Amino acid sequence: MANKHQREMKKQKWDIEPGEWYEMPQGDLVYLWCCDCNLRHVVEFRIVKNKKGKLEIQRRSWRDDFATELRRDYEKKVGKI
């Protein structure tokens, strides 16, 4: 069964042109696929106050090994997407 975040993602339709700025709701994740090697990366942003009280944007990312493996297995069986 899909968790709350997965259900919310299904409701959203992103129609963003290359290079276009967009507003991302706090707590949302960005899923990126590498064109060359089919690695999937998950990127998360947040806005926090630093020690001087100024707002700053923080970013963290990690590789989604499970999704990467599924995509590579699929392409071996079916061909490039």
Image (spheres, rainbow, N blue to C red):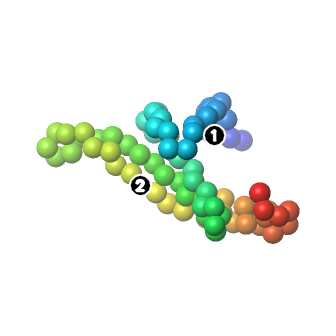
Instruction: Point out residue 51 in the picture as x, y percentages from the top left corner.
Output: 16, 46
Mark 2 or mark 1: which comes first in sequence? 1
Q: How far apart are marks 2 and 1 (CA)?
A: 20 Å
Q: Residue 60 carries which label?
A: 2
Q: What residue type is labelled 2?
A: Arg
Residue at 60% over, 61% down: 34
Instruction: Point out residue 26 in the picture as x, y percentages from the top left corner.
Output: 43, 36
- Secondary structure category for the residue under label 2: strand
Q: Which mark is residue 6?
A: 1
Task: Say few, some or many: other residues with alpha carbon within 10 Å of mark 2 (under 14 / 14 to 19 / 20 or more).
Answer: few
Instruction: Point out residue 5 in the picture as x, y percentages from the top left corner.
Output: 58, 38
Q: Mark yes or no: residue 4 visible.
A: no
Which is in the foreground here, disc 2 or disc 1? Answer: 2
- Please tell me in which quadrant of the rendered image residue 37 appears: bottom right
Location of the C terminus by quadrant is bottom right
Q: In this view, does 70 lie to the left or right of 63?
A: right
